[in-house]
Image (cartoon, rainbow, N blue to C red):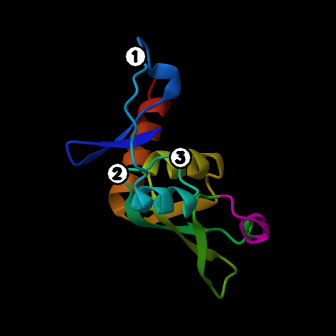
Amino acid sequence: MIGRHDAQTRNFCFTQISNLCVTDKTFDCDEQIKAGLINTDSLFFDNHINEIVLQVSAKVAGYFERRDLLPNQELIRKLDNGDLLLACRQVHPREVIPIVQYWLPHIKIISPSTVQEQMEKVLKSYVSM
């Protein structure tokens, strides 16, 4: 559930709502929020990164060409060696990182570098356990 409170967009998870008080108050649908929900594959509505660019190895490129495996996936171009450059637009890193981890070592986050660094930090922490 998404709503606005004090000019700020808020996300609410139905399973986390408790002590619900039903009233007669109503609300008007925010058409901008509605359009944003309709036009995205994202699970998150706020705190998006405009674009995450990834390089996919030629060894697994066919899977990404057959269907979109990443949220809001767009093909930027196919490189001469068969690798793909893909973009995920208006996504939250937590939607992309698990998919990248699944396809390691055949995929790498090119930009923003902070997302790649964040993923590497988690992987290093896991390996050192």
Q: Report which residue position mark 3 lands on.
A: 43
Residue 40 locus on image (x, y percent) = 54, 60
The amino acid type of the residue labelled 2 equals Asn
At 42% from the left edge and 16% from the top edge, which residue is drawn?
Answer: 20
Q: Secondary structure at mark 2?
A: loop
At 64% from the left edge and 60% from the top edge, which residue is drawn?
Answer: 106
Pick whichever, 52 or 106, lies toward us. 52
Please give the range of residues in magenta.
62-69
Pick whichever, 85 or 129, lies toward us. 85
In the rendered image, the residue lying farthest to the bottom is: 80
The amino acid type of the residue labelled 3 equals Leu
Q: Secondary structure at mark 3?
A: loop
At 22% from the left edge and 48% from the top edge, which residue is drawn?
Answer: 7
The amino acid type of the residue labelled 1 equals Cys
Closest to the camera, between mark 1 and mark 3, is 1
Quadrant position of residue 58:
bottom right
Q: CA distance from mark 2 to mark 3?
A: 11 Å
Mark 1 or mark 3: name the one nearer the start of the chain. Answer: 1
Mark 2 or mark 1: name the one nearer the start of the chain. Answer: 1
Closest to the camera, between mark 2 and mark 1, is 1
Q: CA distance from mark 2 to mark 1?
A: 29 Å
Q: Which mark is residue 47?
A: 2
Q: Which mark is residue 46?
A: none
Q: Report which residue position mark 1 lands on.
A: 21
